Amino acid sequence: MSTLGYSILKHRTPRLFNSNGPIMTSISKLTKIINNNDDLFNGGASTTCTQYLNIIKK
């Protein structure tokens, strides 16, 4: 998602994006999965959006 798209969405639906909202909760869960499987993802820091999307699709 483009940064502009993200900020518009964030502005229009702030509850989704607060730290306990569904989107941030999902992102933090995904980040934990990725950080716990560094070999799988070639290091947590280099994870791309594509890898996130692949996890979500599974």
Image: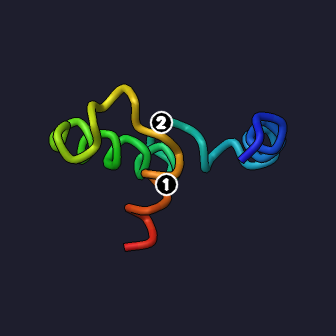
Residue 48: image tag: none
Picture mark count: 2
> Quick check: marks 2 and 1 in contact, CB under 8 Å?
no
The image shows residue 16, relative to residue 42, as above or below, that is: below
Q: Secondary structure at mark 2?
A: loop
- Locate the C terminus and report the quarter of the image it occupies: bottom left
Q: Position of residue 13 (x, y in %)?
A: 73, 49
Task: Tell me the amino acid under the disc marked 2.
Answer: Ser
Q: Which mark is residue 19?
A: 2
Crowd band around label 2 with a 10 angstrom C-alpha radius: few (<14), some (14–19), many (20+): few
User: Which residue lies most toward the bottom here?
Assistant: 58
Which corner quadrant of the image does residue 7 belong to? top right
Color theme of the render: rainbow
Image x and y of residue 21, in percent: 51, 48
Q: Residue at 44% across / 62% down in the picture?
A: 54
Tell whether 16 sits left or right of 38.
right
Question: According to the image, label 1 marks what residue?
Answer: 22
Tell me: residue 38, above or below residue 23. Answer: above
Mark 2 to mark 1 CA distance (whole Å): 9 Å
> In the picture provided, is 21 more to the left or to the right than 17?
left
What amino acid is labelled 1 in the image? Answer: Pro
Q: Residues within 10 Å of mark 1 (few under 14, many from 20)?
A: few
The secondary element bearing badge 1 is classed as: helix
Viewer-closest of 32 and 10? 32
Specify whether 35 is left or right of 45.
Answer: left
